[in-house]
Image: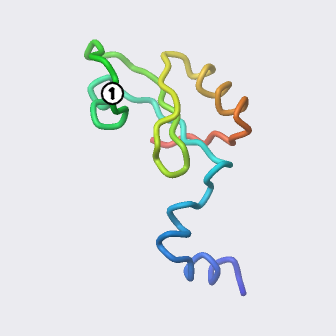
Amino acid sequence: MTEQERISTMTADQFAHLGEGALAYLKKVKSEELKGRFPGMPEIAPGLELWALFAANGQPILLTDERDSALGAAMQNDLTAVSIH
């Protein structure tokens, strides 16, 4: 089975768990975008640019004002960080 065939035959559940425990997504976000992504987060000043780290399934892991801090957290947790836009 080719790689393409294997990927195209994944179930929705398998796809949802792809990269789990191995990948983390790093994204630059504005403070206004965080309301629904980080449950229980206190009010934060508008207009701030922050770095968010998300698990492969989209769960939030970390929010920081420094990119290097987010990358360091990924490394400490044996996660490969990839940037998303």
Q: Nearer the viewer, residue 47 or 9?
A: 9
Q: Quadrant of residue 14?
A: bottom right
Q: Residue furthest bottom?
A: 1
Three-letter code, disc 1: Gly
x, y percentage for residue 80? 69, 42
Q: Is residue 44 above or below residue 17?
A: above
SS type, badge 1 = loop
Q: Nearer the viewer, residue 2 or 56?
A: 56
State the residue at coordinates (27%, 16%). 43
What x and y, as percent, mark residue 10? 56, 77
Q: Which residue is mark 1?
A: 40
Where in the figure is residue 78, as x and y percent of width and height? 74, 38
Left or right: residue 2 versus residue 26 is: right
Tell me: residue 68, above or below residue 23.
Answer: above
Count the marks. 1
Residue at left 28%, top 30%?
Answer: 35
Q: Of residues 51 and 19, which is closer to you in this image?
A: 19
Quadrant in the picture for the C terminus: top left
Give x and y (percent) for residue 21: 65, 49
Q: Is 51 on the left-hand or right-hand side of 74?
A: left
